[in-house]
Amino acid sequence: MVSLASFAYLLTLVDTTAAGRAYAAYGGVYIVASISWLWLVENSKPDRWDVTGALICLVGAAVILFPTRA
């Protein structure tokens, strides 16, 4: 809860044009962290669909974050 609240607060400090991109990056990392939690804490090995979905999310976040903009 503290981490999520801290993130939400810090997101309000980001320039308005970049806040959505920061949130997209957070979403990708959150999904990967959730899959990691499933594996490491709940002892449930992710299947190929879990891993594929997480990778798609990370690629999507990278597409949003890293292109140069005019």
Image (tube, grey):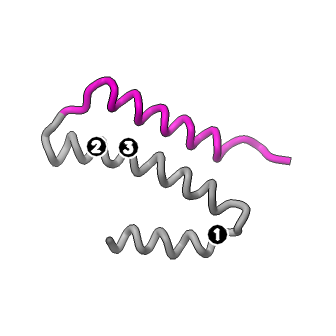
Q: Is residue 43 above or below residue 3?
A: above
Task: Find out whether residue 65 is within the magenta segment.
Answer: yes
* Label 2: how many Cα within 10 Å (few below 14, some 14–19, many 20+): some
On the image, the x and y values in percent for residue 40 come to 19, 44
Give the labeled residue for mark 1: 14
How far separated are the C-alphas under marks 3 and 2? 6 Å
Q: Which mark is residue 36?
A: 2
Give the labeled residue for mark 3: 32
The residue furthest right is 70
Q: Give the secondary structure at mark 3.
A: helix
Residue kind at label 1, given as amino acid type = Val
Looking at the image, residue 46 sits to the left or right of residue 49; the answer is left
Q: Earlier in the sequence, mark 3 or mark 1?
A: 1
Give the residue at x 30% y 41%. Answer: 35
In which quarter of the view is residue 54 placed?
Answer: top left
On the image, the x and y values in percent for residue 21 come to 63, 54
* Label 3: how many Cα within 10 Å (few below 14, some 14–19, many 20+): some
**Majority secondary structure of magenta residues:** helix
Q: Give the secondary structure at mark 1.
A: loop
The magenta stretch spans which residues?
Answer: 45-70
In which quarter of the view is residue 43 placed?
Answer: top left
Task: Find out whether residue 10 is within the magenta segment.
Answer: no
The residue furthest left is 43
Give the residue at x 34% y 26%. Answer: 49
Q: How many marks?
A: 3
Looking at the image, residue 8 sits to the left or right of residue 15; the answer is left
Residue kind at label 2, given as amino acid type = Ser
Q: Earlier in the sequence, mark 1 or mark 2?
A: 1
Question: Do the residues under discs 3 and 2 have CB atoms within 8 angstroms?
Answer: yes
Residue kind at label 3, given as amino acid type = Val
